[in-house]
Image: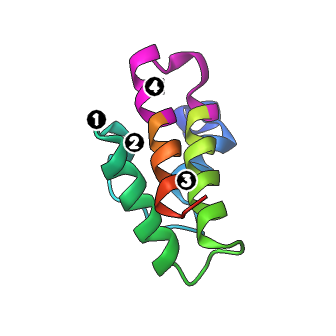
Amino acid sequence: MTEKQKGRKWSAEAGADSDALDLQPKLFEKDDPAEIAASLKRSAEHSQRRKANPFRSAMSMLSFYINRAGRNLSASRKRVLEKAKDELRRDFHR
């Protein structure tokens, strides 16, 4: 294990190596909340490895990312991701 790996948090590894969803690269860096939500929905519905229903898996991954970023997430970025949550709810009719 290198020095860089020792400093990494388990959450970074969990997000990168999630066994539940295959996420599009740089998904959470996109500026369109609807695009983020649509991609999460697609991934959740096509995953054969998820343990929960598609809505819950997609919402969990989005919330996990927001919580993991914490204070490092700018206000504008957080607004986009929170809007993506609303889009996800709408996409799943919730």
> Are the residues at dot 2 and dot 4 in contact (C-beta closer than 8 Å)?
no
Label 2 CA crowd tier, 10 Å (few <14, some 14–19, many 20+): many
- Residue lying farthest to the bottom in this orientation: 48
* Element type where label 2 sits in the image: helix
Q: Indicate the amino acid at tag 1.
A: Asp
Q: In this view, does 51 lie to the left or right of 49?
A: right
Q: In this view, does 24 lie to the left or right of 71?
A: left
The C terminus lies in quadrant: bottom right
Q: How far apart are marks 4 and 3 (CA)?
A: 16 Å
Q: Residue 89 carries which label?
A: 3
Image x and y of residue 6, in percent:
63, 36
Span colored in magenta? 67-82
Residue receiving disc 1: 31
Of labels 4 and 3, the one closer to you: 3
Q: Which of marks 2 and 4 is nearer the N terminus?
A: 2
Q: Earlier in the sequence, mark 1 or mark 3?
A: 1
Q: Indicate the amino acid at tag 3.
A: Arg
Residue receiving disc 2: 28
Q: How far apart are marks 2 and 3 (CA)?
A: 17 Å
Q: Is residue 79 left or right of residue 94?
A: left
Q: Which of marks 2 and 3 is nearer the N terminus?
A: 2
Q: In this view, does 20 lie to the left or right of 22?
A: right
- Is residue 1 in view from this perspective? no
Asked whether 39 falls inside the magenta stretch, the response is no
Label 1 CA crowd tier, 10 Å (few <14, some 14–19, many 20+): some
Of labels 1 and 2, the one closer to you: 1
* Element type where label 4 sits in the image: helix
Image x and y of residue 88, in percent:
50, 53
Q: How far apart are marks 2 and 4 (CA)?
A: 12 Å
Image x and y of residue 53, in percent:
67, 73
Image x and y of residue 11, in percent:
65, 42
> Above or below — where is 2 with respect to 17?
above
